[in-house]
Amino acid sequence: MGSNNPAGLLWLGYAVLTVCFWGLYGIFLHSGQLGMSDAATGRYKAFLFVGIAYFLTAVLAPLAILLYKGASWSFPGRGMTFSLIAGIVGAAGAFCVLLAFGAGGAPSVVMSIIFAGAPIVNALVALALHPPAGGIGAIRPLFFVGIILAALGGLLVTLYKPPPGRPTSSAAVAPASPDGAAASRDDRP
């Protein structure tokens, strides 16, 4: 955590906010899917509204900031290409979360696997794209220990998540799941 950063630890605050937002994503997405009350296409309707939210947040907000700051409207090809790829993999990942829920994955398990696995994929792809100067031998062993611990953490959270509590009076009747069957208490957020 370098103090050379003129913003100090502001980056850490934003990172923690991202953890909070993405940690809530699966819960709210599953609730939206169930709230559509459409067993056949509820997950797709929910994803449509995720897209609308992305438009509002990822298109209109940056446009307003760019206009406010008087930014140039020059967009180099490399930057556009990687940014579009990032958007595609991000949206595809969000869509796969819904598909995992629809295929019977409990939100707590699906999100634990995603949030344990994503940092591992990120680290390995970053190594492939930007290998260390001294080759693989220059990587400290604790890096590999961290990858193993991340995988183990995801596995342990998935295997030993606490059982759901007793339903409240408003949750006494389980809503229909996307396949038309009543959702089990484990499938609810």
Image (spheres, helix red, strand yellow):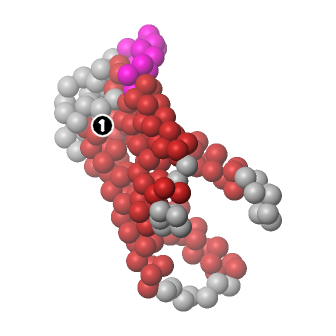
**Residue at (30% x, 37% y) in the render:** 101
Q: Is residue 91 magenta?
A: no
Residue to which mark 1 is pinned: 101
Q: From what the image shows, is residue 68 above or below residue 127?
A: below
Whether residue 156 can be seen here:
yes
Residue 40, percent across and down? 19, 40
**Looking at the rendering, in which quadrant would you find the C terminus?**
top left
**Residue at (48% x, 44% y) in the render:** 144
Instruction: Say which of 138 and 48 sits in front.
Output: 138
Whether residue 48 can be seen here:
no
State left or right for residue 154 relative to residue 34.
right
Instruction: Say which of 138 and 181 sits in front.
Output: 138
State left or right for residue 118 relative to residue 173.
right
Q: From what the image shows, is residue 66 above or below residue 98?
A: below
Instruction: Say which of 83 and 59 sits in front.
Output: 83
Residue 143, percent across and down? 53, 46
Residue 15, percent across and down? 63, 50
State left or right for residue 31 relative to residue 103.
right
Residue 180, percent across and down? 19, 30
For mark 1, does the 10 Å Cα neighbourhood hold few (<14), some (14 to 19), or many (20 or more) residues? Answer: many
Span shown in magenta: 158-172
Q: Is residue 170 magenta?
A: yes
**Residue at (64% x, 45% y) in the render:** 16
**Residue at (40% x, 77% y) in the render:** 81
Residue type at numbered disc 1 = Phe
